[in-house]
Image (spheres, rainbow, N blue to C red):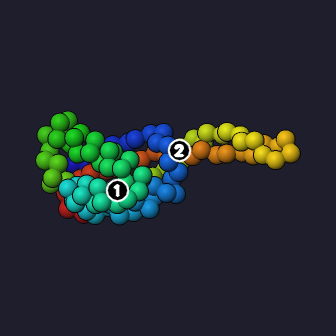
C-alpha cells in the first residue's frame, strides 16, 4: 500500500529543497527521519515535517506501522512565485522573486 502526503506553498526555492529530497528515496522511514534531523539545511527541517506527517497518516488512517514503511518517492515541485520589488540606485526598482515549493512524499509498505 502507498501513502502519499503533499505539503503545498512551502517558502523555499525548489532547487534548494531538491538537494535534500534526493537523499530520501529507498530509505526506511525511520532512517530518512534520522537523516533529515542531521542535515543542516532549512529544506531538511521542512521535508522532515512532511515526512512525519506521512508516517502519521500511514499509522492513523491506514493502520500501518510507520517504522516498516519505505520512502518510495520524494518529489519537490515548483509552486507559485511571489513577486516583490526592492529600491535600487537612481530611482529604479529591482525585482525580487520569492519562490515556493510543493513537497510530495510517497511511503510504501513493500520493499523498493
Q: Which residue is mark 2?
A: 100
Q: How many marks?
A: 2
Q: Which residue position is annotated with label 1?
A: 73
Residue 67 on image: x %, y %: 15, 52
Q: Is residue 107 left or right of residue 84?
A: left
Q: Secondary structure at mark 1?
A: strand
Q: Quadrant of the C terminus?
A: bottom left
Residue 97 in percent (x, y) is at: 64, 46
Give the image location of residue 37, x and y in percent.
29, 55
41 to 7, vertically: above or below: below
Eye-nearest disc, 2 or 1: 2
Element type at mark 2:
loop
Q: Which mark is residue 32?
A: none
Q: Earlier in the sequence, mark 2 or mark 1?
A: 1
Above or below 60: residue 65 = below
Q: Along the horizontal axis of the image, is 12 left or right of 72?
A: right
Amino acid at each position: 500500500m502507498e501513502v502519499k502526503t503533499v505539503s503545498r506553498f512551502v517558502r523555499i526555492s525548489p532547487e534548494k529543497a531538491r538537494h535534500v529530497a534526493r537523499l530520501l528515496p529507498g530509505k526506511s522511514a525511520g532512517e530518512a527521519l534520522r537523516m533529515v534531523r542531521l542535515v543542516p539545511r532549512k529544506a531538511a527541517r521542512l521535508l522532515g515535517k512532511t515526512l512525519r506527517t506521512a508516517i502519521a497518516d500511514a499509522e492513523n488512517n491506514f493502520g500501518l506501522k510507520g517504522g516498516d514503511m519505505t520512502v518510495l518517492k520524494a518529489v519537490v515541485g515548483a509552486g507559485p512565485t511571489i513577486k516583490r520589488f526592492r529600491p535600487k540606485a537612481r530611482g529604479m526598482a529591482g525585482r525580487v522573486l520569492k519562490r515556493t515549493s510543493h513537497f510530495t512524499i510517497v511511503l510504501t509498505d513493500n520493499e523498493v
